[in-house]
Image (tube, rainbow, N blue to C red):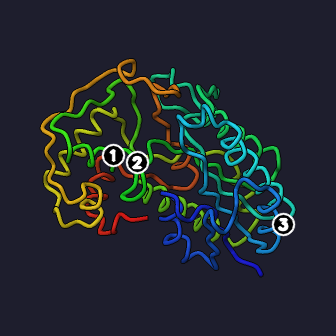
Amino acid sequence: MSAGILLIGKNGQVGHELQHFLEPLGELVSLDRQALDLGSTNEIRRIIREIQPLIIVNAAAYTAVDKAESDQEAAHAINAEAPRAMAEEAKKLGAAVVHYSTDYVFDGSKTSPYLETDRTDPLGAYGQTKLEGEQAIRESGPAHLIFRTAWVYSTRGRNFLLTMLRLASERQELRVVRDQIGAPTWCREIARGTAAVLKALLDRGNGPQAFAAASGTYHITAGGATSWYEFAQAILDEARSASPDLPWFAAATQGRKIVAERVIPITTDQYPTPARRPAYSVLSNALLNRTFGVRLPDWREELHAAFAEQGTGSD
């Protein structure tokens, strides 16, 4: 069996969207956690050898940031050892690897957008294991595209957008952190941007050479910047004018009306969590745009487009 593209993590936020955008690019095999145990490097190697893809797209990850602090072994297995196995097998096949990483590889101490070349310094286990995954891919030596993104949300699964809508249907007042800054990024635009990059490389017609020449780390986030507090306000603004019959919206609120009247800004210190978060997570997308001509929309445009999404909101 062989395929042009092997997508790992098809049921995740980004993976779910990638299926639609990758299908036009060639034969696609998509696997979920039931079909591939990411905790077993032997299983990963067996599947890749069996399928023999030209491109491996890894959209799977251990993303429970707080739980990772007490579950570091599992986070390391999925975020570091699994990508290493994928990359080593890709190298043997002459295949390319597309992998997603995170703003959490940085400590958030900057006050201007992070460049791909800035020093990494994770604050916790999640960021550390994601950084180790990046390093494992580079060390293994296949052609690769590592896409760092941030503040990802979707109209399905578990994320900030859906949490705010649920709480807004239960409470009149929401308390949200105002001193963490980033760019909320809709998973659909990450998938769309990824497919645009891959199409550009495939259109060059020289296969592995095109991917090898473009190998590297790129940031792929929405344009602009905001705080969680301002993002929550924007979500409520959109929600107040949204149709209650919108399937995913109705699922998020369980059919209840939005009752929240205000969002109260709080500091990170007022909302303690097991894992520390970067205070500043804005990533520069200049390299992505310069290399591939790809630029994601402003975060406000993405949020507005998400509220027009007609999906069911189910997993």
The amino acid on which the numbered mark 2 sits, given as a three-letter code, is Asn
Residue 96 image offset from top left, x and y in percent: 73, 61
Q: Secondary structure at mark 1?
A: helix
Image quadrant assignment for residue 80: top right
Distance, label 1 to label 3, CA atoms, is 42 Å
**In the rendered structure, are the residues bearing label 1 and label 2 in contact, judged by CB atoms less than 8 Å apart?**
yes
Measuring from the top left, give residue 123's x and y in whole percent: 58, 25
Q: Is residue 85 left or right of residue 189?
A: right
Q: Which residue is mark 3?
A: 93
Residue pictured at 37% horizontal, 44% vertical: 160
Task: Indicate which disc, 1 or 3, sits on the residue closer to the N terminus.
Answer: 3
Q: Is residue 143 left or right of residue 68?
A: right
- What residue is rendered at 44% in x and 47% in y? 152
Q: Quadrant of the C terminus?
A: bottom left
- 120 with respect to 238 (left or right): right
Q: Which residue is mark 1?
A: 163
Q: Residue at x 77, y 44 (%)?
A: 136
Q: Amino acid at mark 3?
A: Leu
Q: Which residue is mark 2?
A: 159
Three-letter code, disc 1: Thr
How would you rate the neighbour count of disc 2 (Cα within 10 Å): few for under 14, some for 14-19, many for 20 or more? some
